[in-house]
Image (cartoon, rainbow, N blue to C red):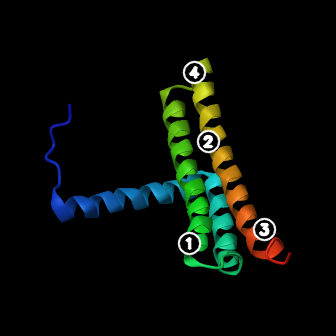
Amino acid sequence: MNHKPEAKGFVRVIKATGYSMKGLKAAYQHEIAFRQEVVLLLCLFPASFFVARNATQWALLMGTVIIVMIVELVNSAIEAAVDRHGGEWHELSGRAKDLGSASVFMALLNLAFVWGAIFVDNYIWSVW
């Protein structure tokens, strides 16, 4: 058991922020999929101002991008933990990695559906 004293209050927030920044840096350095999703964010952020017609739509559009990045971070954490455990193949390790990958796929499908629906509402059906 770890009996080190825990930081409290604002110091804890500062430390937690530092750990989060360290995690984002590690994801960017070691995970090509995360870097690709950063590029996706950089492309979709300006596009969101043209696609959305109001703040709610903008939040939905950007929320889907952020969800993809969150799920990718969790998937990368699962992969790192599985890889740390051992290099030999194990059915459960493979399943854990496949499930993590499937979660990223589902988040990307969600992104496509939301962006597509808002685009269609604003630019296709509004013309009719």
What residue do we see at 58% from left, 51% from top? 30
What residue sits right under mark 4 in the picture? Answer: 92
User: Who comes first in sequence, dot 4 or dot 2?
Assistant: 4
Front position among marks 1 and 4:
1
Q: x, y (%) of residue 114?
A: 68, 60
Between the residue at mark 3 and the residue at mark 2, the CA separation in whole angstroms equals 25 Å
Give, as a three-letter code, the residue at label 1: Thr
Q: Secondary structure at mark 2?
A: helix
Between the residue at mark 1 and the residue at mark 4, the CA separation in whole angstroms equals 41 Å
Q: x, y (%) of residue 80?
A: 52, 39
Image quarter of the C terminus:
bottom right
Front position among marks 1 and 2:
1
User: Who comes first in sequence, dot 3 or dot 4?
Assistant: 4
Q: Nearer the viewer, residue 107 or 13?
A: 107
What residue do we see at 52% from left, 31% from top? 82
Give, as a three-letter code, the residue at label 4: Leu
Asked if labels 4 and 1 touch by Cβ distance under 8 angstroms, the answer is no
Between the residue at mark 3 and the residue at mark 4, the CA separation in whole angstroms equals 41 Å
Write down the quadrant of residue 17 in the picture. Answer: bottom left
Give, as a three-letter code, the residue at label 2: Ser
In the displayed image of the protein, which residue is found farthest to the right?
A: 128
In the rendered image of this protein, does residue 100 appear above or below residue 18? Answer: above
Q: Is residue 90 visible?
A: no
What residue sits right under mark 1 in the picture? Answer: 56
Disc sitting over residue 103 in the figure: 2
Between the residue at mark 4 and the residue at mark 2, the CA separation in whole angstroms equals 16 Å
What residue sits right under mark 3 in the picture? Answer: 120
Front position among marks 3 and 2:
3
